[in-house]
Structures are given as C-alpha cells and as structure tokens.
Image (cartoon, grey):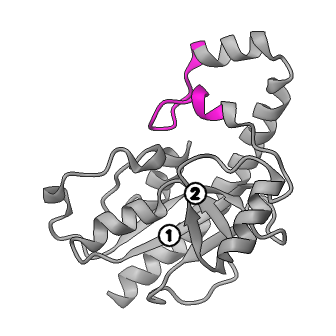
Amino acid sequence: MESRAMAQALKGRGFRFHTAGIGAGHLPQPAALDGVSIILLCGVAGALDPALTIGDVILDDPGHRISDSSLYRRGRIHTAGEIISTPAKKATLYADTGTLAVDMEQSIVRDFAAQRHIPVIGLRAISDTADQILDSAVLNLVDDLGRPRATRIASALIRRPSLARHLNRLNSNTKIALKNLSAALIFAADHLNQTG
C-alpha cells in the first residue's frame, strides 16, 4: 500500500522511486544513487507524541529544505529495531528521545545516505496513535517489502479470530495516513523541484 501510494504521488515529478522495505532491508546498490541529490523517505509510523492523531504527517527535515506547510508537523522521527507496540513503550520512548514518531527505517537510510553525502528528508504519516496497541503479530503477516502473506493471515485469523478487528482498524488507519502522506509528499516534491 505504501509503495503504490508514494509511487503515484511522485509520478511525473522527476523523482526515482525505490522501496527500501521493512527495516530498510532493500537499500539500493550504491551505483543506483549516481546523480541523486536528496532522498525523500516516506511511509507510515507510530505516534510517540500523544497529541498526534491518525493521518498526521511528520516532516523530519534537519536541513529545513522544505518550507512550512499546514500539511505536516516538523519534528524528529526515531528508528527502532522492532515494533513499539504498547502505549507504555511508546510513552517511555517519547520521554527518552523527545521524538514525535517511530519507524523502522529512518536512521538506517540516513546513515546509508550520509556515506554518499546525500541528505535524507523523512515524511511519515501516523497509522497508530500513542495510546493504541499495535499487535506485534502484524509484522509476521507481511513480507520484508510489506506485502500481505495471505496464508499467514488466514492461519493467524483461524488461531485468533479477534485479530480481524485489529487488522481492519490498522488497514483503515493506514488508508487515512497514506492519503495525507500523498498530499504532503506532492507538496514536498514540488517544493524541492522549485528550489533545486
């Protein structure tokens, strides 16, 4: 879902598109970055700041390359090696880091790009709020590119029918997040094209 939405938003805007995958396990070969001057890293994230709601977009832009807009809130995004699944864990991470949201890719991609002197701008839309539980089982229901694994989903639902409500809510939240993220990405891409 994320890849399709982002590819559609960038269509015709002069950007190359690459899916890094969960945990940035599919980074491009260094040669693929020839001529790349900036990376826009986009997707969904979990809220750490309790004020964030479903669909809010966070812009992590240390170089302030993109102008202010009502489409997003500026702030840092934290990268975790696992899903931060409970309100208690989210609250602890928020208190410890002061970051607004958490993903599994931002710092990995930033470190990878820094070796090539390419700045990274993060755009993340909130798909689960700070007070929501995110069932960590969902990570096992998709492959490393985030594509659903039908057999695993069916098996999980047979074992835990209550998981269906959680998956439906997450799907609905993700659709809202991606709609808002697409608008913010179009704004950011157009701004970068105008400013060079």
Q: Nearer the viewer, mark 2 or mark 1?
A: 2
Q: Position of residue 180 (x, y in %)?
A: 67, 62
Which quadrant would the C terminus be assigned to in this image?
Answer: bottom left
Quarter of image, res 79: bottom right
First-in-chain label (2 vs 1) = 2
Q: Secondary structure at mark 2?
A: strand
Q: Which residue is mark 2?
A: 103
149 falls in the magenta region: yes
Quarter placement of the N terminus? top right
Q: Amino acid at mark 1?
A: Gly
Q: Which residue is mark 1?
A: 122
Q: Residue at x 80, y 25 (%)?
A: 163
Residue at figure coordinates x 82%, y 56% from the top left: 88
Task: Say which quarter of the image contains residue 184.
Answer: bottom right
Question: Which region is colored magenta?
Answer: 138-151
Query: Badge 1, how many Cα within 10 Å: few under 14, some, many 20+?
Result: many
Whether tag 2 and tag 1 are in contact, CB under 8 A, the answer is yes
What is the CA distance from the residue labelled 2 to the residue labelled 1?
10 Å
Please say if 51 is above or below 88.
Answer: below
